[in-house]
Amino acid sequence: MPIYISILFLAFIQNVSFSMVSRSRNRDSRAYHTICSVFSNGIWFMTMHQLVAADLTFYLAIPYIIGTVAGSLFGVEASIKIEKLIGAKA
């Protein structure tokens, strides 16, 4: 997979997971927060590994930023649906 696509994908998933863990901090489910935390930190590590392995060139900022913005927007919507499904309350 070309590095730009890989970074775009990882950045998207990274911010989906970040949005989820951010929201889960304010919910009454420790299990939900634990799962989100492991997911978020694992994806962050994988993303940073790819960025460092690719010598963190300036050109990687474009797919990274696009991926993170799209991931944030998607992650909030996904979190809302999951929270309703499991009954997690603020």
Image (cartoon, helix red, strand yellow):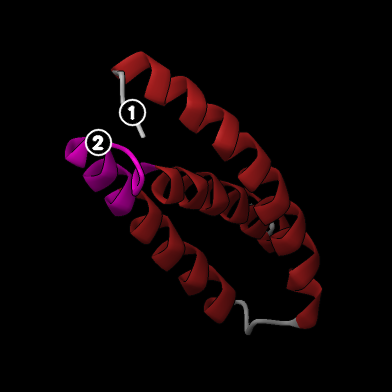
The quadrant where residue 2 appears: bottom right
Residue 33 on image: x %, y %: 27, 44
Tell me the amino acid under the disc marked 1.
Lys
22 vs 32: above or below: below
Number of marks in the image? 2
Residue at the far left in the pictured view: 31
- Magenta-colored stretch includes residue 36: yes
Q: Label 2 belongs to which residue? A: 28
Lateral position of residue 8 relative to residue 40, left or right: right
Q: Nearer the viewer, residue 40 or 32?
A: 32
Which percent across, then down, holds residue 89? Answer: 33, 28
| Residue displayed at 22% across by 35% down | 29
Q: Considering only vertical position in the picture, is 15 above or below 35?
A: below
Mark 2 or mark 1: which comes first in sequence?
A: 2
Q: Quadrant of residue 88?
A: top left
| Residue at the image position 31 percent from the left and 19 percent from the top | 87
Magenta stretch bounds: 24-38
| Residue of label 1 | 89
